[in-house]
């Protein structure tokens, strides 16, 4: 009898989680929005397949709740947030930043994307400690996490936001219109591969917490997503996915809190 009661109580305790899991994709397909131009999330390979840590996570989440997945590559963080708030996507993959809080719910971080700087080969900037100095001009992508971070934290350098166009980034550096360009390490590595004359600083400014967003007010759905991330971390799924992605500067985010944050 005691065993039956224990089983019944355990089954009852699972019901809210199971209901929330089904509510993640109420339309029967998990529509996952992500930044199409961010190699730290996912890329489309030569066969047309979408691969990367975020793609792996979306596919596994869809598999667990028993629905197909539909990927929605979008142009920028605002577009991902708008897709989720407007009902065009069920979840979104986006970096947490305090400036983005308000219209969606952020999960805990599942991976951290190392942010660094690209400089000219002959630059006297050697580490990230040399970047925020008076007289230096530093750029980041429009509304990128590193740009938001620099606006909050940098006190001396002059900051600007530019496009991710590789040719323009190179031109600005070569013309010495900027002294350094900040972005995730994979984006910077892609630029360096194109030719000599540039180098990446050896250390990171910080690791951007990549999270999953859901519509505002869907607290049970958010809890289900956080439980899923906990399990993906504990099972080793995230570690294997990060390693398979080959993305520079990507690492599994530590657990312990469902509340995302960025370094002070």
Image (spheres, rainbow, N blue to C red):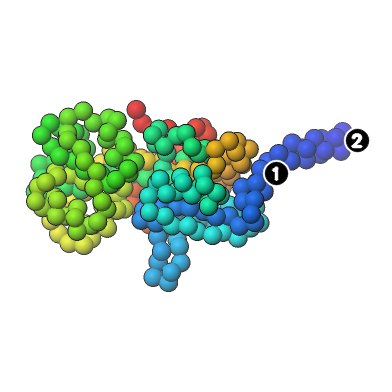
Q: Secondary structure at mark 2?
A: loop
Q: Residues within 10 Å of mark 2 (few under 14, many from 20)?
A: few
Is residue 19 visible to us here? yes
Dot label at residue 1: 2
Left or right: 221, with 237 as reference point: right
Tell me which label, 2 or 1, sits earlier in the chain.
2
Tell me residue 20's x, y (percent): 66, 43
- Of residue 46 and residue 176, the one placed in the foreground of this image is 176
Q: Is residue 39 above or below residue 128?
A: below
- Who's the residue at 47% across and 40% down the image? 109
The part of the image, by quadrant, that contains residue 6 is top right
**In this rendering, which labeled residue sits more in front, label 2 or label 1?**
1
Secondary structure, mark 1, is: helix
Could you tell me residue 115's position as x and y percent? 30, 43
Mark 1 surroundings within 10 Å by alpha-carbon count, few (fewer than 14), some (14 through 19), many (20 or more)? few
The residue at which mark 1 appears reads as: 19
- Picture residue at 70% right of the left edge, 44% below the top: 19
Quarter of the image containing the N terminus?
top right
The residue lying furthest to the front in this view is 86
């Amino acid at each position: 009898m005691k065993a039956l009661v224990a089983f019944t109580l355990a089954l009852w305790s699972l019901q809210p989680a199971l209901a929330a899991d089904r509510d993640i994709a109420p339309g029967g397909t998990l529509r996952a929005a992500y930044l199409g131009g961010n190699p730290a999330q996912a890329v489309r390979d030569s066969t047309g397949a979408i691969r990367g840590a975020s793609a792996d996570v979306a596919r596994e989440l869809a598999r667990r709740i028993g629905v197909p997945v539909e990927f929605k590559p979008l142009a920028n963080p605002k577009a991902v947030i708008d897709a989720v708030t407007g009902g065009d996507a069920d979840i979104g993959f986006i970096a947490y930043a305090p400036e983005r809080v308000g219209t969606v719910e952020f999960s805990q971080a599942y991976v951290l994307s190392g942010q660094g700087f690209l400089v000219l080969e002959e630059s006297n900037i050697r580490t990230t400690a040399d970047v925020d100095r008076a007289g230096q001009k530093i750029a980041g992508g429009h509304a990128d996490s590193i740009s938001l971070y620099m606006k909050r934290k940098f006190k001396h350098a002059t900051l600007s936001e530019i496009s991710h166009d590789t040719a323009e980034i190179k031109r600005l550096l070569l013309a010495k219109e900027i002294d350094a360009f900040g972005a995730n390490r994979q984006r910077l590595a892609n630029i360096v591969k194109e030719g000599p004359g540039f180098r990446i600083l050896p250390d990171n400014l910080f690791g951007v917490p990549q999270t999953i967003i859901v519509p505002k007010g869907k607290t049970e759905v958010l809890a289900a997503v956080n439980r899923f991330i906990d399990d993906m971390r504990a099972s080793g799924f995230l570690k294997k996915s990060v390693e398979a992605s080959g993305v520079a500067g990507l690492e599994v985010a530590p657990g312990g809190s469902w509340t995302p944050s960025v370094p002070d």
